Image (cartoon, rainbow, N blue to C red):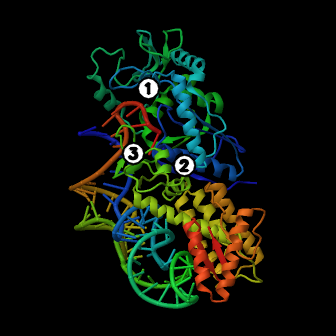
Amino acid sequence: MGKPVLIIYNTLTRRKEPFRPINEERVGMYVCGPTVYGDGHLGHARPAITFDILYRYLMHLGYKVRYVRNITDVGHLEHDADEGEDKIAKKARLEQLEPMEVVQHYLLRYHKAMERLNVLPPTIEPHASGHIIEQIEFVKRIIDAGYAYESNGSIYFDVEKYSKNHSYGKLSGRNIDELFENTRELDGQSEKRRGCDFALWKKAQPEHIMHWPSPWSEGFPGWHLECSTMGTKYLGEEFDIHGGGIDLVFPHHECEIAQSTAALGHETVHYWMHNNMITIDGKKMGKSYGNFITLDEFFEGSHPLLTQAYSPMTIRFFILQAHYRSTVDFSNDALIAAERGLERMTEAYNRLMRIKPSETSSVDVSKLRQQCEEAMLDDLNTPIVISHLFDATKSINAITDGKATISQLDLDELKDVFNVMLKDILGLQLDATMSEGGKEGGADRFKGAVDLLLQIRMEAKQNKDWATSDKIRDELKALGFNVKDTKDGFEWS
RNA sequence: GGUCGGUUGGAUGAGUGGCUUAGUCUACGGUCUGCAAAACCGUCUACAGCAGUUCGAAUCUGCUACCGACCUCCA
Protein backbone atom coordinates (compact mmCIF):
# COMPACT_ATOMS: atom_id res chain seq x y z
CA MET A 1 0.00 0.00 0.00
CA GLY A 2 2.19 2.77 1.28
CA LYS A 3 4.79 4.29 -0.91
CA PRO A 4 8.27 4.85 0.47
CA VAL A 5 8.54 8.31 1.98
CA LEU A 6 10.48 10.77 -0.09
CA ILE A 7 12.41 13.30 1.96
CA ILE A 8 12.80 16.68 0.33
CA TYR A 9 14.32 19.93 1.47
CA ASN A 10 11.75 22.66 1.78
CA THR A 11 13.14 26.15 1.36
CA LEU A 12 10.19 27.49 3.31
CA THR A 13 11.19 25.69 6.50
CA ARG A 14 14.89 25.28 5.66
CA ARG A 15 14.65 21.67 6.65
CA LYS A 16 14.31 18.29 5.10
CA GLU A 17 10.73 17.11 5.39
CA PRO A 18 8.82 13.97 4.50
CA PHE A 19 6.86 14.58 1.34
CA ARG A 20 3.14 14.18 1.94
CA PRO A 21 1.18 15.04 -1.18
CA ILE A 22 -2.26 16.57 -0.92
CA ASN A 23 -3.65 13.65 -2.86
CA GLU A 24 -2.31 10.19 -2.19
CA GLU A 25 -2.09 9.22 -5.82
CA ARG A 26 -1.35 12.47 -7.59
CA VAL A 27 1.28 15.11 -7.34
CA GLY A 28 1.19 18.61 -8.77
CA MET A 29 4.47 20.34 -9.44
CA TYR A 30 5.26 23.69 -10.98
CA VAL A 31 8.72 24.72 -12.12
CA CYS A 32 9.84 28.11 -13.37
CA GLY A 33 10.82 27.69 -16.99
CA PRO A 34 12.91 29.81 -19.29
CA THR A 35 12.44 33.30 -20.59
CA VAL A 36 12.72 32.69 -24.30
CA TYR A 37 14.74 35.61 -25.55
CA GLY A 38 18.10 33.89 -25.79
CA ASP A 39 19.74 30.53 -26.11
CA GLY A 40 19.70 28.29 -23.09
CA HIS A 41 23.01 28.00 -21.27
CA LEU A 42 24.48 25.51 -18.84
CA GLY A 43 22.71 27.18 -15.95
CA HIS A 44 19.35 26.50 -17.55
CA ALA A 45 20.17 22.82 -17.73
CA ARG A 46 20.40 22.55 -13.96
CA PRO A 47 16.76 23.13 -12.94
CA ALA A 48 15.57 21.32 -16.04
CA ILE A 49 17.56 18.24 -15.08
CA THR A 50 17.00 18.55 -11.34
CA PHE A 51 13.25 18.65 -11.67
CA ASP A 52 13.32 16.10 -14.46
CA ILE A 53 14.84 13.77 -11.87
CA LEU A 54 12.14 14.68 -9.38
CA TYR A 55 9.44 14.14 -12.02
CA ARG A 56 10.89 10.78 -13.02
CA TYR A 57 11.33 9.65 -9.44
CA LEU A 58 7.83 10.63 -8.37
CA MET A 59 6.51 8.55 -11.25
CA HIS A 60 8.82 5.72 -10.23
CA LEU A 61 7.28 5.87 -6.76
CA GLY A 62 3.91 5.36 -8.38
CA TYR A 63 2.49 8.86 -8.41
CA LYS A 64 0.60 10.35 -11.27
CA VAL A 65 2.29 13.66 -11.79
CA ARG A 66 1.06 16.82 -13.40
CA TYR A 67 4.20 18.73 -14.21
CA VAL A 68 3.76 22.35 -15.25
CA ARG A 69 6.71 24.32 -16.53
CA ASN A 70 5.97 27.74 -17.88
CA ILE A 71 7.36 29.66 -20.81
CA THR A 72 7.92 33.31 -20.05
CA ASP A 73 7.26 35.24 -23.20
CA VAL A 74 6.02 38.52 -21.74
CA GLY A 75 6.82 40.64 -18.75
CA HIS A 76 10.17 40.68 -16.98
CA LEU A 77 11.00 44.31 -17.36
CA GLU A 78 14.47 45.39 -18.12
CA HIS A 79 15.87 47.80 -15.66
CA ASP A 80 18.91 49.26 -17.30
CA ALA A 81 18.74 51.10 -20.58
CA ASP A 82 15.19 51.37 -21.76
CA GLU A 83 13.29 51.43 -18.56
CA GLY A 84 10.10 49.52 -18.65
CA GLU A 85 10.75 47.91 -21.95
CA ASP A 86 9.92 44.32 -22.26
CA LYS A 87 12.83 41.98 -22.86
CA ILE A 88 11.12 40.17 -25.65
CA ALA A 89 10.06 43.40 -27.25
CA LYS A 90 13.54 44.83 -27.04
CA LYS A 91 15.14 41.86 -28.68
CA ALA A 92 12.46 41.91 -31.34
CA ARG A 93 13.04 45.50 -32.19
CA LEU A 94 16.77 45.03 -32.41
CA GLU A 95 16.42 42.19 -34.80
CA GLN A 96 13.43 43.60 -36.64
CA LEU A 97 11.36 40.60 -35.83
CA GLU A 98 7.93 40.12 -34.47
CA PRO A 99 8.11 39.33 -30.74
CA MET A 100 6.42 36.04 -31.31
CA GLU A 101 9.04 35.17 -33.88
CA VAL A 102 11.71 35.62 -31.26
CA VAL A 103 9.74 33.50 -28.83
CA GLN A 104 9.18 30.78 -31.38
CA HIS A 105 12.79 30.74 -32.46
CA TYR A 106 14.27 30.36 -29.00
CA LEU A 107 11.54 28.09 -27.74
CA LEU A 108 12.23 25.60 -30.50
CA ARG A 109 15.93 25.71 -29.72
CA TYR A 110 15.23 25.26 -26.03
CA HIS A 111 13.06 22.24 -26.70
CA LYS A 112 15.70 20.73 -28.91
CA ALA A 113 18.40 21.20 -26.27
CA MET A 114 16.15 19.70 -23.61
CA GLU A 115 15.43 16.74 -25.80
CA ARG A 116 19.12 16.14 -26.35
CA LEU A 117 19.66 16.27 -22.59
CA ASN A 118 16.92 13.66 -22.33
CA VAL A 119 14.79 15.97 -20.21
CA LEU A 120 11.21 14.78 -20.37
CA PRO A 121 8.73 17.41 -21.48
CA PRO A 122 6.39 18.68 -18.78
CA THR A 123 2.79 17.61 -19.02
CA ILE A 124 1.69 21.22 -19.44
CA GLU A 125 3.87 24.01 -20.79
CA PRO A 126 1.79 27.17 -20.55
CA HIS A 127 2.82 30.46 -22.11
CA ALA A 128 2.39 33.65 -20.17
CA SER A 129 1.14 35.37 -23.32
CA GLY A 130 -1.63 32.83 -23.57
CA HIS A 131 -2.91 33.66 -20.11
CA ILE A 132 -3.31 37.41 -20.17
CA ILE A 133 -7.01 37.19 -19.34
CA GLU A 134 -6.36 34.91 -16.39
CA GLN A 135 -3.66 37.25 -15.14
CA ILE A 136 -5.99 40.23 -15.37
CA GLU A 137 -8.58 38.29 -13.39
CA PHE A 138 -5.94 37.47 -10.83
CA VAL A 139 -5.04 41.13 -10.44
CA LYS A 140 -8.72 41.91 -9.91
CA ARG A 141 -8.87 39.44 -7.07
CA ILE A 142 -5.86 41.05 -5.42
CA ILE A 143 -7.42 44.48 -5.85
CA ASP A 144 -10.72 43.23 -4.44
CA ALA A 145 -8.88 41.83 -1.45
CA GLY A 146 -7.41 45.26 -0.91
CA TYR A 147 -3.77 44.50 -1.47
CA ALA A 148 -3.13 46.48 -4.62
CA TYR A 149 -3.48 50.03 -5.79
CA GLU A 150 -3.62 51.80 -9.09
CA SER A 151 -1.16 54.43 -10.06
CA ASN A 152 -1.16 56.10 -13.44
CA GLY A 153 -2.66 53.10 -15.19
CA SER A 154 -0.41 50.57 -13.52
CA ILE A 155 -1.31 48.30 -10.64
CA TYR A 156 1.11 47.70 -7.81
CA PHE A 157 1.11 45.23 -5.00
CA ASP A 158 0.95 46.91 -1.59
CA VAL A 159 3.69 45.17 0.35
CA GLU A 160 3.25 47.30 3.44
CA LYS A 161 -0.42 46.49 3.77
CA TYR A 162 0.15 42.83 3.02
CA SER A 163 2.86 42.59 5.65
CA LYS A 164 0.45 43.77 8.34
CA ASN A 165 -1.58 40.60 8.01
CA HIS A 166 0.91 38.25 6.45
CA SER A 167 4.56 37.51 6.54
CA TYR A 168 6.27 39.02 3.53
CA GLY A 169 9.78 37.64 3.49
CA LYS A 170 9.08 34.26 5.00
CA LEU A 171 10.58 32.33 2.13
CA SER A 172 13.74 34.33 1.65
CA GLY A 173 14.30 35.26 5.29
CA ARG A 174 13.92 38.94 4.58
CA ASN A 175 13.17 41.31 7.40
CA ILE A 176 10.28 43.48 6.36
CA ASP A 177 11.41 46.54 8.29
CA GLU A 178 14.79 46.44 6.67
CA LEU A 179 13.19 46.09 3.30
CA PHE A 180 11.25 49.25 3.98
CA GLU A 181 14.29 51.09 5.20
CA ASN A 182 16.43 50.07 2.27
CA THR A 183 13.90 51.06 -0.28
CA ARG A 184 12.17 54.04 1.25
CA GLU A 185 14.53 56.80 0.26
CA LEU A 186 15.42 55.59 -3.18
CA ASP A 187 12.42 56.55 -5.25
CA GLY A 188 11.48 60.16 -5.31
CA GLN A 189 8.91 60.21 -8.06
CA SER A 190 8.09 56.60 -8.54
CA GLU A 191 4.56 55.53 -9.17
CA LYS A 192 5.04 53.12 -6.32
CA ARG A 193 4.29 53.97 -2.74
CA ARG A 194 7.26 51.96 -1.62
CA GLY A 195 10.32 50.77 -3.43
CA CYS A 196 9.59 47.19 -2.58
CA ASP A 197 6.09 47.26 -4.04
CA PHE A 198 5.99 45.38 -7.30
CA ALA A 199 3.99 45.67 -10.48
CA LEU A 200 1.00 43.47 -11.12
CA TRP A 201 0.04 45.31 -14.28
CA LYS A 202 2.19 47.78 -16.09
CA LYS A 203 0.94 50.46 -18.43
CA ALA A 204 2.71 50.21 -21.75
CA GLN A 205 4.74 53.09 -23.06
CA PRO A 206 4.08 54.09 -26.66
CA GLU A 207 7.17 52.30 -27.92
CA HIS A 208 6.09 48.97 -26.51
CA ILE A 209 5.23 46.36 -29.03
CA MET A 210 3.62 43.86 -26.71
CA HIS A 211 0.59 45.06 -24.88
CA TRP A 212 -2.95 44.04 -24.15
CA PRO A 213 -6.08 45.83 -23.08
CA SER A 214 -7.09 45.76 -19.44
CA PRO A 215 -9.50 47.65 -17.21
CA TRP A 216 -6.66 49.92 -16.13
CA SER A 217 -4.60 50.55 -19.22
CA GLU A 218 -3.18 49.14 -22.39
CA GLY A 219 -0.26 47.25 -20.92
CA PHE A 220 1.25 44.01 -19.85
CA PRO A 221 1.30 41.82 -16.75
CA GLY A 222 3.85 42.22 -13.99
CA TRP A 223 6.99 40.26 -13.38
CA HIS A 224 5.79 37.61 -11.04
CA LEU A 225 2.17 37.20 -11.91
CA GLU A 226 2.26 34.45 -14.49
CA CYS A 227 3.47 31.81 -12.10
CA SER A 228 0.79 32.51 -9.52
CA THR A 229 -1.85 32.57 -12.20
CA MET A 230 -0.86 29.55 -14.22
CA GLY A 231 0.20 27.50 -11.25
CA THR A 232 -3.17 27.80 -9.57
CA LYS A 233 -5.02 27.48 -12.85
CA TYR A 234 -3.56 24.10 -13.66
CA LEU A 235 -2.70 22.69 -10.26
CA GLY A 236 -5.34 24.17 -8.00
CA GLU A 237 -5.37 26.78 -5.29
CA GLU A 238 -3.14 24.53 -3.27
CA PHE A 239 -0.58 22.27 -4.80
CA ASP A 240 2.42 20.23 -3.74
CA ILE A 241 5.70 21.39 -5.18
CA HIS A 242 7.05 24.57 -6.67
CA GLY A 243 10.60 24.54 -7.98
CA GLY A 244 13.14 26.78 -9.60
CA GLY A 245 16.63 28.19 -9.33
CA ILE A 246 17.76 29.45 -5.97
CA ASP A 247 18.23 32.90 -7.46
CA LEU A 248 14.49 33.13 -7.88
CA VAL A 249 13.77 32.89 -4.17
CA PHE A 250 13.80 36.64 -3.87
CA PRO A 251 12.02 38.50 -5.16
CA HIS A 252 10.24 36.23 -7.61
CA HIS A 253 8.96 33.47 -5.37
CA GLU A 254 8.47 35.74 -2.41
CA CYS A 255 6.22 37.91 -4.54
CA GLU A 256 4.43 34.87 -5.84
CA ILE A 257 3.55 33.80 -2.33
CA ALA A 258 2.32 37.28 -1.51
CA GLN A 259 0.21 37.54 -4.66
CA SER A 260 -1.38 34.15 -4.24
CA THR A 261 -2.03 34.58 -0.57
CA ALA A 262 -3.52 38.01 -1.14
CA ALA A 263 -5.78 36.81 -3.92
CA LEU A 264 -6.82 33.49 -2.50
CA GLY A 265 -6.67 34.12 1.21
CA HIS A 266 -4.40 31.20 1.88
CA GLU A 267 -1.07 29.76 0.91
CA THR A 268 -0.68 27.83 -2.28
CA VAL A 269 2.54 25.86 -2.30
CA HIS A 270 3.41 23.18 0.23
CA TYR A 271 7.02 22.48 -0.75
CA TRP A 272 9.40 24.97 -2.26
CA MET A 273 12.45 23.40 -3.87
CA HIS A 274 15.43 25.28 -5.26
CA ASN A 275 18.44 24.09 -7.18
CA ASN A 276 21.77 25.77 -6.62
CA MET A 277 23.84 27.52 -9.24
CA ILE A 278 26.51 26.34 -11.62
CA THR A 279 29.63 28.39 -11.12
CA ILE A 280 32.55 29.21 -13.33
CA ASP A 281 35.73 30.24 -11.55
CA GLY A 282 33.69 30.23 -8.38
CA LYS A 283 31.15 32.72 -9.71
CA LYS A 284 27.60 32.09 -10.75
CA MET A 285 27.18 31.44 -14.43
CA GLY A 286 24.49 33.82 -15.54
CA LYS A 287 23.32 36.30 -18.06
CA SER A 288 24.08 39.26 -15.86
CA TYR A 289 27.74 38.32 -15.58
CA GLY A 290 28.04 37.50 -19.24
CA ASN A 291 30.07 34.43 -18.29
CA PHE A 292 27.70 31.82 -19.58
CA ILE A 293 28.28 29.12 -22.15
CA THR A 294 25.27 28.04 -24.15
CA LEU A 295 24.23 24.43 -24.37
CA ASP A 296 24.80 24.34 -28.10
CA GLU A 297 28.31 25.65 -27.54
CA PHE A 298 28.94 22.73 -25.22
CA PHE A 299 27.51 20.26 -27.69
CA GLU A 300 29.69 21.68 -30.46
CA GLY A 301 32.73 22.71 -28.44
CA SER A 302 32.46 26.12 -30.03
CA HIS A 303 33.24 28.35 -27.06
CA PRO A 304 36.76 29.68 -26.46
CA LEU A 305 36.78 28.31 -22.92
CA LEU A 306 36.05 24.79 -24.12
CA THR A 307 38.86 22.54 -25.25
CA GLN A 308 36.46 20.08 -26.85
CA ALA A 309 32.80 19.30 -27.48
CA TYR A 310 30.78 17.57 -24.79
CA SER A 311 27.87 15.30 -25.46
CA PRO A 312 24.50 16.08 -23.91
CA MET A 313 24.80 12.98 -21.74
CA THR A 314 28.16 14.15 -20.43
CA ILE A 315 26.52 17.42 -19.40
CA ARG A 316 23.69 15.54 -17.75
CA PHE A 317 26.04 13.17 -15.96
CA PHE A 318 28.21 16.07 -14.84
CA ILE A 319 25.22 17.79 -13.27
CA LEU A 320 23.96 14.61 -11.63
CA GLN A 321 27.33 13.94 -10.03
CA ALA A 322 26.68 16.84 -7.69
CA HIS A 323 23.72 17.20 -5.36
CA TYR A 324 21.20 19.70 -6.66
CA ARG A 325 21.46 21.96 -3.63
CA SER A 326 25.22 22.34 -3.95
CA THR A 327 26.94 24.64 -6.32
CA VAL A 328 28.86 22.82 -8.98
CA ASP A 329 31.91 24.36 -10.52
CA PHE A 330 32.32 24.14 -14.25
CA SER A 331 35.72 23.53 -15.77
CA ASN A 332 37.09 21.59 -18.70
CA ASP A 333 38.83 19.19 -16.36
CA ALA A 334 35.64 18.53 -14.46
CA LEU A 335 33.74 17.88 -17.67
CA ILE A 336 36.43 15.62 -19.03
CA ALA A 337 36.38 13.69 -15.78
CA ALA A 338 32.63 13.35 -16.10
CA GLU A 339 33.00 12.19 -19.67
CA ARG A 340 35.49 9.48 -18.71
CA GLY A 341 33.35 8.36 -15.82
CA LEU A 342 30.30 8.15 -18.02
CA GLU A 343 32.27 6.13 -20.55
CA ARG A 344 33.23 3.68 -17.87
CA MET A 345 29.67 3.42 -16.69
CA THR A 346 28.41 2.97 -20.24
CA GLU A 347 30.86 0.19 -20.99
CA ALA A 348 29.97 -1.58 -17.79
CA TYR A 349 26.29 -1.29 -18.66
CA ASN A 350 26.82 -2.71 -22.10
CA ARG A 351 28.87 -5.55 -20.69
CA LEU A 352 26.19 -6.24 -18.11
CA MET A 353 23.65 -6.76 -20.85
CA ARG A 354 25.83 -9.47 -22.40
CA ILE A 355 26.92 -11.32 -19.29
CA LYS A 356 26.29 -15.06 -19.29
CA PRO A 357 25.01 -16.38 -15.99
CA SER A 358 26.62 -19.15 -13.97
CA GLU A 359 25.19 -21.63 -11.51
CA THR A 360 26.07 -19.53 -8.50
CA SER A 361 27.01 -15.98 -7.66
CA SER A 362 30.27 -14.89 -6.15
CA VAL A 363 29.12 -11.28 -6.15
CA ASP A 364 26.53 -9.74 -3.88
CA VAL A 365 23.87 -7.71 -5.65
CA SER A 366 21.23 -7.90 -2.95
CA LYS A 367 21.87 -4.48 -1.44
CA LEU A 368 22.25 -2.39 -4.56
CA ARG A 369 18.62 -1.61 -5.28
CA GLN A 370 17.91 -0.62 -1.73
CA GLN A 371 21.02 1.53 -1.51
CA CYS A 372 20.05 3.40 -4.64
CA GLU A 373 16.47 3.85 -3.51
CA GLU A 374 17.56 5.14 -0.13
CA ALA A 375 19.83 7.68 -1.75
CA MET A 376 17.04 8.91 -4.01
CA LEU A 377 14.58 9.08 -1.15
CA ASP A 378 17.02 11.27 0.74
CA ASP A 379 16.39 14.50 -1.13
CA LEU A 380 17.31 13.07 -4.53
CA ASN A 381 20.93 12.30 -3.77
CA THR A 382 21.99 11.39 -7.28
CA PRO A 383 25.76 11.44 -6.60
CA ILE A 384 25.30 8.70 -4.05
CA VAL A 385 23.21 6.67 -6.47
CA ILE A 386 25.95 7.00 -9.04
CA SER A 387 28.61 5.95 -6.54
CA HIS A 388 26.67 2.77 -5.73
CA LEU A 389 26.32 2.01 -9.40
CA PHE A 390 30.04 2.49 -9.84
CA ASP A 391 30.63 0.04 -7.03
CA ALA A 392 28.54 -2.43 -8.97
CA THR A 393 30.56 -1.86 -12.13
CA LYS A 394 33.49 -3.47 -10.38
CA SER A 395 31.49 -6.66 -10.03
CA ILE A 396 30.35 -6.44 -13.63
CA ASN A 397 33.89 -6.08 -14.88
CA ALA A 398 35.10 -8.87 -12.66
CA ILE A 399 32.44 -11.18 -14.09
CA THR A 400 33.35 -10.10 -17.61
CA ASP A 401 36.98 -10.90 -16.85
CA GLY A 402 35.97 -14.32 -15.60
CA LYS A 403 37.10 -13.51 -12.08
CA ALA A 404 33.63 -13.70 -10.62
CA THR A 405 30.34 -15.39 -11.39
CA ILE A 406 26.69 -14.47 -11.19
CA SER A 407 23.52 -16.55 -11.16
CA GLN A 408 20.64 -16.00 -13.52
CA LEU A 409 18.53 -14.65 -10.69
CA ASP A 410 21.15 -12.15 -9.58
CA LEU A 411 21.89 -11.19 -13.15
CA ASP A 412 18.26 -10.36 -13.80
CA GLU A 413 18.18 -8.31 -10.63
CA LEU A 414 21.34 -6.43 -11.52
CA LYS A 415 20.14 -5.69 -15.03
CA ASP A 416 16.84 -4.44 -13.71
CA VAL A 417 18.45 -2.16 -11.15
CA PHE A 418 20.71 -0.67 -13.79
CA ASN A 419 17.87 -0.16 -16.19
CA VAL A 420 15.63 1.40 -13.59
CA MET A 421 18.22 3.61 -11.94
CA LEU A 422 20.44 4.56 -14.81
CA LYS A 423 17.93 4.87 -17.60
CA ASP A 424 14.52 5.45 -16.06
CA ILE A 425 15.42 7.60 -13.08
CA LEU A 426 18.72 9.26 -13.89
CA GLY A 427 17.65 9.47 -17.51
CA LEU A 428 21.03 8.56 -18.93
CA GLN A 429 20.93 7.25 -22.46
CA LEU A 430 23.61 4.65 -22.91
CA ASP A 431 24.14 3.79 -26.51
CA ALA A 432 24.66 0.11 -26.94
CA THR A 433 26.82 0.32 -30.00
CA MET A 434 29.31 -2.21 -28.80
CA SER A 435 29.13 -5.63 -30.24
CA GLU A 436 30.70 -8.92 -29.43
CA GLY A 437 32.40 -11.67 -31.27
CA GLY A 438 30.76 -15.00 -31.81
CA LYS A 439 27.34 -13.68 -30.94
CA GLU A 440 24.51 -12.48 -33.02
CA GLY A 441 25.78 -9.61 -35.08
CA GLY A 442 22.11 -9.16 -35.49
CA ALA A 443 19.89 -7.67 -38.07
CA ASP A 444 22.31 -4.83 -38.46
CA ARG A 445 24.48 -5.43 -41.52
CA PHE A 446 26.90 -2.79 -40.41
CA LYS A 447 27.55 -4.54 -37.15
CA GLY A 448 27.79 -7.83 -38.93
CA ALA A 449 30.48 -6.55 -41.22
CA VAL A 450 32.61 -5.21 -38.38
CA ASP A 451 32.13 -8.42 -36.46
CA LEU A 452 33.20 -10.40 -39.49
CA LEU A 453 36.41 -8.43 -39.77
CA LEU A 454 37.13 -8.98 -36.13
CA GLN A 455 36.38 -12.67 -36.48
CA ILE A 456 39.03 -12.83 -39.17
CA ARG A 457 41.35 -10.99 -36.82
CA MET A 458 40.64 -13.60 -34.15
CA GLU A 459 41.66 -16.32 -36.55
CA ALA A 460 44.80 -14.45 -37.47
CA LYS A 461 45.58 -14.12 -33.80
CA GLN A 462 45.19 -17.83 -33.30
CA ASN A 463 47.67 -18.37 -36.11
CA LYS A 464 49.93 -15.82 -34.44
CA ASP A 465 49.68 -13.74 -37.57
CA TRP A 466 50.21 -10.50 -35.68
CA ALA A 467 50.74 -8.48 -38.82
CA THR A 468 47.23 -9.25 -40.05
CA SER A 469 45.58 -8.92 -36.70
CA ASP A 470 47.24 -5.59 -35.96
CA LYS A 471 46.45 -4.34 -39.41
CA ILE A 472 42.76 -5.01 -38.95
CA ARG A 473 42.78 -3.36 -35.55
CA ASP A 474 44.76 -0.34 -36.70
CA GLU A 475 42.76 0.18 -39.85
CA LEU A 476 39.53 -0.05 -37.93
CA LYS A 477 40.87 2.41 -35.44
CA ALA A 478 41.69 4.80 -38.23
CA LEU A 479 38.06 4.55 -39.25
CA GLY A 480 36.95 5.40 -35.74
CA PHE A 481 36.42 1.99 -34.20
CA ASN A 482 37.93 1.15 -30.87
CA VAL A 483 38.74 -2.51 -30.51
CA LYS A 484 39.31 -4.11 -27.15
CA ASP A 485 40.19 -7.73 -26.61
CA THR A 486 38.32 -9.60 -23.94
CA LYS A 487 38.90 -12.90 -22.23
CA ASP A 488 37.38 -14.96 -24.98
CA GLY A 489 36.63 -12.57 -27.76
CA PHE A 490 36.52 -8.89 -28.43
CA GLU A 491 34.36 -5.85 -28.14
CA TRP A 492 34.26 -2.72 -30.20
CA SER A 493 32.70 0.64 -30.15
C1' G B 1 25.59 47.54 4.76
C1' G B 2 21.54 43.58 5.50
C1' U B 3 19.95 38.31 4.92
C1' C B 4 21.51 33.43 3.79
C1' G B 5 24.97 29.70 2.46
C1' G B 6 29.75 27.61 1.72
C1' U B 7 35.30 26.43 2.82
C1' U B 8 36.77 18.35 2.32
C1' G B 9 42.88 14.88 -0.62
C1' G B 10 46.36 16.80 -7.39
C1' A B 11 40.94 17.97 -9.75
C1' U B 12 35.74 17.08 -8.84
C1' G B 13 32.36 15.81 -5.17
C1' A B 14 29.43 12.80 -1.15
C1' G B 15 29.26 12.43 3.98
C1' U B 16 26.78 15.29 9.86
C1' G B 17 29.49 12.34 16.36
C1' G B 18 32.67 6.68 16.74
C1' C B 19 31.89 1.46 12.60
C1' U B 20 35.50 0.41 5.82
C1' U B 21 35.13 8.04 6.70
C1' A B 22 32.11 7.59 -0.51
C1' G B 23 32.36 7.59 -5.72
C1' U B 24 34.53 9.69 -10.25
C1' C B 25 38.87 11.74 -12.77
C1' U B 26 44.26 12.24 -12.55
C1' A B 27 49.14 10.33 -11.10
C1' C B 28 52.29 6.31 -9.65
C1' G B 29 53.25 0.98 -8.86
C1' G B 30 51.59 -3.94 -9.99
C1' U B 31 48.57 -8.18 -12.35
C1' C B 32 46.70 -9.83 -16.99
C1' U B 33 47.87 -9.59 -22.38
C1' G B 34 51.87 -11.43 -28.59
C1' C B 35 51.45 -5.99 -28.51
C1' A B 36 47.75 -2.21 -27.65
C1' A B 37 43.35 -0.99 -25.28
C1' A B 38 40.27 -2.36 -21.43
C1' A B 39 39.81 -4.54 -16.79
C1' C B 40 41.48 -5.75 -11.93
C1' C B 41 44.61 -4.90 -7.41
C1' G B 42 47.45 -1.44 -4.61
C1' U B 43 49.34 3.57 -3.25
C1' C B 44 48.63 9.17 -2.46
C1' U B 45 44.53 8.84 4.38
C1' A B 46 41.89 15.22 3.19
C1' C B 47 38.24 17.77 6.00
C1' A B 48 40.01 26.74 6.28
C1' G B 49 42.20 28.46 11.28
C1' C B 50 41.66 28.89 16.59
C1' A B 51 39.06 27.74 20.98
C1' G B 52 35.21 24.91 23.34
C1' U B 53 31.48 20.69 24.29
C1' U B 54 32.37 15.26 24.42
C1' C B 55 35.14 9.18 26.38
C1' G B 56 35.44 10.51 21.07
C1' A B 57 34.22 15.68 15.88
C1' A B 58 35.29 16.75 9.17
C1' U B 59 30.44 16.23 11.51
C1' C B 60 27.85 20.08 17.53
C1' U B 61 28.96 25.40 19.72
C1' G B 62 31.63 30.10 19.49
C1' C B 63 35.08 33.30 17.25
C1' U B 64 38.40 34.57 13.04
C1' A B 65 39.71 34.41 7.90
C1' C B 66 38.35 33.68 2.98
C1' C B 67 34.62 32.73 -0.93
C1' G B 68 29.80 33.01 -2.89
C1' A B 69 24.34 33.89 -3.50
C1' C B 70 20.36 37.28 -2.83
C1' C B 71 18.95 42.48 -1.73
C1' U B 72 17.86 44.73 -9.73
C1' C B 73 16.48 40.91 -14.71
C1' C B 74 18.60 36.18 -13.63
C1' A B 75 18.00 28.81 -13.75
Q: What residue lies at 34% left-to-right and 52% top-to-bottom?
A: A282
> Mark 1 sits on what residue?
A91
Chain containing mark 2: A
Note whether A223 is above or below A6 in the view shown.
above
User: Looking at the picture, how far across and down is residue B48, in whole percent?
Assistant: 29, 65
Which is more foreground, mark 1 or mark 3? Answer: 1
Using the image, name the chain to which the residue with label 1 belongs.
A
Residue A136 drawn at (x, y percent) = 56, 17
**Residue beneath disc 2:** A50
| SS label for mark 3 | loop
**Chain for disc number 3:** A
Q: Secondary structure at mark 2?
A: helix
Task: Give the amino acid type for the residue marked by disc 2 in the picture.
Answer: Thr
Helix, strand or loop at label 1? It is: helix
Q: Which residue is mark 3?
A: A285
Q: Is residue B38 above or below residue A69?
A: below
Nearer the N terminus, badge 1 or badge 3?
A: 1
Mark toward the viewer: 3 or 2: 3
Lateral position of residue A374 relative to residue A42, left or right: right
Q: Residue at x 62, y 33 (%)?
A: A125
Question: Which residue occupies the foreground of this view, A385 or A455?
Answer: A455
